[in-house]
Image: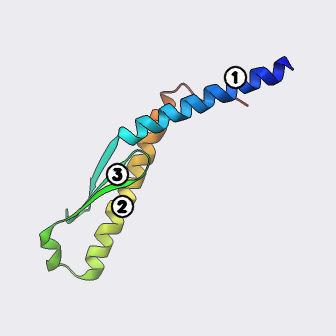
Amino acid sequence: MFDKLGQLKDLWKLKSQMEELKKRLDNMVIKTDSPRHLVEITMNGSMEVKEVRIDPLAKNFSEEELAKDIKDAFNKAVRDTQAMAAQAMGGLGGLPQA
Protein backbone atom coordinates (compact mmCIF):
# COMPACT_ATOMS: atom_id res chain seq x y z
CA MET A 1 0.00 0.00 0.00
CA PHE A 2 2.83 2.41 0.84
CA ASP A 3 4.40 1.62 -2.53
CA LYS A 4 1.21 2.76 -4.29
CA LEU A 5 1.18 5.94 -2.21
CA GLY A 6 4.77 6.63 -3.25
CA GLN A 7 3.88 6.10 -6.90
CA LEU A 8 0.96 8.50 -6.52
CA LYS A 9 3.28 11.13 -5.06
CA ASP A 10 5.69 10.60 -7.97
CA LEU A 11 2.84 11.04 -10.45
CA TRP A 12 1.72 14.22 -8.71
CA LYS A 13 5.29 15.56 -8.85
CA LEU A 14 5.54 14.66 -12.54
CA LYS A 15 2.22 16.41 -13.25
CA SER A 16 3.45 19.54 -11.47
CA GLN A 17 6.72 19.48 -13.41
CA MET A 18 4.89 19.09 -16.71
CA GLU A 19 2.54 21.98 -15.91
CA GLU A 20 5.54 24.17 -15.05
CA LEU A 21 7.29 23.14 -18.27
CA LYS A 22 4.17 23.97 -20.32
CA LYS A 23 4.02 27.45 -18.75
CA ARG A 24 7.70 28.02 -19.52
CA LEU A 25 7.31 26.82 -23.11
CA ASP A 26 4.23 28.96 -23.67
CA ASN A 27 6.30 32.01 -22.72
CA MET A 28 9.30 31.17 -24.93
CA VAL A 29 9.28 32.53 -28.47
CA ILE A 30 11.17 31.62 -31.63
CA LYS A 31 11.23 33.84 -34.73
CA THR A 32 12.49 32.38 -37.98
CA ASP A 33 13.01 33.87 -41.41
CA SER A 34 12.85 32.11 -44.73
CA PRO A 35 16.05 32.00 -46.82
CA ARG A 36 14.95 34.99 -48.92
CA HIS A 37 13.54 36.79 -45.86
CA LEU A 38 10.10 36.86 -47.46
CA VAL A 39 8.40 35.00 -44.61
CA GLU A 40 8.85 35.34 -40.86
CA ILE A 41 7.15 32.90 -38.47
CA THR A 42 6.85 33.46 -34.74
CA MET A 43 6.18 30.30 -32.74
CA ASN A 44 6.07 29.69 -29.00
CA GLY A 45 7.73 26.79 -27.21
CA SER A 46 4.47 24.82 -27.30
CA MET A 47 4.71 24.91 -31.11
CA GLU A 48 1.78 27.29 -31.57
CA VAL A 49 2.19 29.71 -34.47
CA LYS A 50 1.72 33.17 -33.00
CA GLU A 51 2.40 35.31 -36.05
CA VAL A 52 3.18 35.00 -39.75
CA ARG A 53 4.63 37.98 -41.59
CA ILE A 54 4.95 38.07 -45.36
CA ASP A 55 7.13 40.74 -46.88
CA PRO A 56 5.42 42.89 -49.54
CA LEU A 57 8.25 41.92 -51.93
CA ALA A 58 6.76 38.40 -51.98
CA LYS A 59 4.48 39.53 -54.81
CA ASN A 60 7.59 39.56 -57.03
CA PHE A 61 8.09 35.81 -56.58
CA SER A 62 6.22 32.87 -58.04
CA GLU A 63 3.68 30.90 -56.05
CA GLU A 64 6.11 27.97 -55.92
CA GLU A 65 8.95 30.15 -54.59
CA LEU A 66 6.72 31.68 -51.93
CA ALA A 67 5.37 28.25 -50.94
CA LYS A 68 8.95 26.99 -50.55
CA ASP A 69 9.86 29.95 -48.35
CA ILE A 70 6.80 29.35 -46.16
CA LYS A 71 7.66 25.66 -45.86
CA ASP A 72 11.31 26.36 -45.07
CA ALA A 73 10.48 29.00 -42.44
CA PHE A 74 7.89 26.75 -40.79
CA ASN A 75 10.19 23.70 -40.72
CA LYS A 76 13.01 25.78 -39.23
CA ALA A 77 10.64 27.17 -36.58
CA VAL A 78 9.58 23.63 -35.65
CA ARG A 79 13.20 22.42 -35.41
CA ASP A 80 14.24 25.44 -33.33
CA THR A 81 11.22 25.05 -31.06
CA GLN A 82 11.94 21.35 -30.52
CA ALA A 83 15.55 22.15 -29.61
CA MET A 84 14.36 24.85 -27.21
CA ALA A 85 11.86 22.44 -25.61
CA ALA A 86 14.53 19.75 -25.22
CA GLN A 87 16.80 22.25 -23.52
CA ALA A 88 13.97 23.36 -21.22
CA MET A 89 13.20 19.72 -20.34
CA GLY A 90 16.87 19.12 -19.57
CA GLY A 91 16.66 21.99 -17.10
CA LEU A 92 14.12 20.00 -15.10
CA GLY A 93 16.82 17.52 -14.21
CA GLY A 94 15.07 14.69 -16.01
CA LEU A 95 11.70 13.15 -15.37
CA PRO A 96 11.11 10.67 -12.56
CA GLN A 97 11.39 7.02 -13.54
CA ALA A 98 8.15 5.05 -13.46
* Residue for badge 3: 43
- Label 3, label 1: how far apart the Cα atoms are: 34 Å
Give the SS element for disc 3: strand
Between disc 3 and disc 1, whose residue precedes? 1
Q: Amino acid at mark 1?
A: Lys
Between disc 3 and disc 2, whose residue precedes? 3
Whether residue 90 is visible to the viewer of this picture, yes or no, is yes
- Residue at (32%, 72%) from the top-left corner? 68
- Label 3, label 2: how far apart the Cα atoms are: 9 Å
- Residue at (35%, 40%) from the top-left corner? 28
- Residue at (55%, 34%) from the top-left corner? 18
Kindly indicate whether the residue at mark 2 contacts the one at mark 3 (C-beta within 8 angstroms). no
Q: Amino acid at mark 2?
A: Phe
Between disc 1 and disc 2, whose residue precedes? 1
Q: Position of residue 32 (x, y in %)?
A: 28, 54
Q: Is residue 13 left or right of residue 91?
A: right
Kindly indicate whether the residue at mark 1 contacts the one at mark 3 (C-beta within 8 angstroms). no
Which quadrant of the view contains residue 41?
A: bottom left
The residue most toward the top is: 2
Quadrant into which the C terminus falls: top right
Dot in front, 3 or 1: 1
- Residue at (14%, 79%) from the top-left corner? 60
Q: Is residue 55 left or right of residue 11?
A: left
Give the SS element for disc 1: helix
| Closer to us: 49 or 86 | 49
Q: Number of callouts in the render?
A: 3
Give the SS element for disc 2: helix
> What mark, if any, has residue 74 been given in the picture?
2
Location of residue 76 with respect to 44 vertically, above or below: below
Location of residue 60 with respect to 89 vertically, above or below: below
* Residue for badge 1: 9
Location of residue 4 with respect to 23 vertically, above or below: above
